[in-house]
Image (spheres, rainbow, N blue to C red):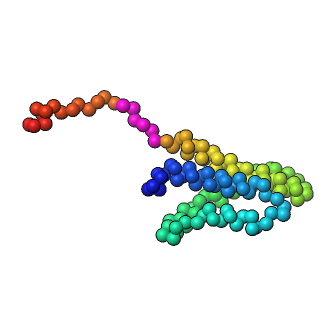
Amino acid sequence: MNRFGNVRVLFGGLLVAAAAYGLFLPLGIDWAYLLMFPLLFLIGVDEREHGVAAGLLYTAIQFGMALGLSAVTAVHVAALGDGGPAGARLDALRTALLVPFGAVLLAAFVTAFGLRERRRAPGPAEPVPSAVEASA
């Protein structure tokens, strides 16, 4: 944060999250857990920052379960319809995974273009003290 600033770190984190969600979109019936293993490296942090990272991670998990899971479940149930074969259920799951993927892309867009530092409009110039006033 000190090196790159809040907005850049937030934007980078959102891009990594979008990449992680995007990697889950080609999910298949024969997909092995081993294919998910590289994604676990995305949550690695320096040992000195474990406490802060754990707090942020679990806060995000709780918020995600409260808001995100309900939206994903609603889309999944709507896409699932009457169920059907395993392929149809998998298609419904892929459709539901588009919700967090799209939300993260939207958040990255807002971060990139909506959180820029606003520059103040130039106001009237401050009067510069004259040499006579400065010596008095």
Q: Residue furthest top?
A: 124
Chief SS of the magenta region: loop
Q: Residue furthest bottom?
A: 47
Q: Report the side of 100 relative to 46 (left or right).
A: right
Spot occupied by residue 23 in the image (x, y as percentages of width and height): 72, 56
Residue ID at (64%, 50%): 104
Find residue 25 and report its image quarter: bottom right
Spot occupied by residue 47 in the image (x, y as percentages of width and height): 51, 71
Residue ID at (88%, 56%): 87
Question: What residue span does the magenta drawing correspond to?
Answer: 117-122
Residue 9 lies, with reference to residue 39, above or below; the image says above
Q: Is residue 71 visible?
A: no
Q: Is residue 90 magenta?
A: no
Q: Count numbered badges in the picture.
A: 0
Residue ID at (80%, 63%): 31
Spot occupied by residue 32 in the image (x, y as percentages of width and height): 79, 66
Find residue 36 and report its image quarter: bottom right
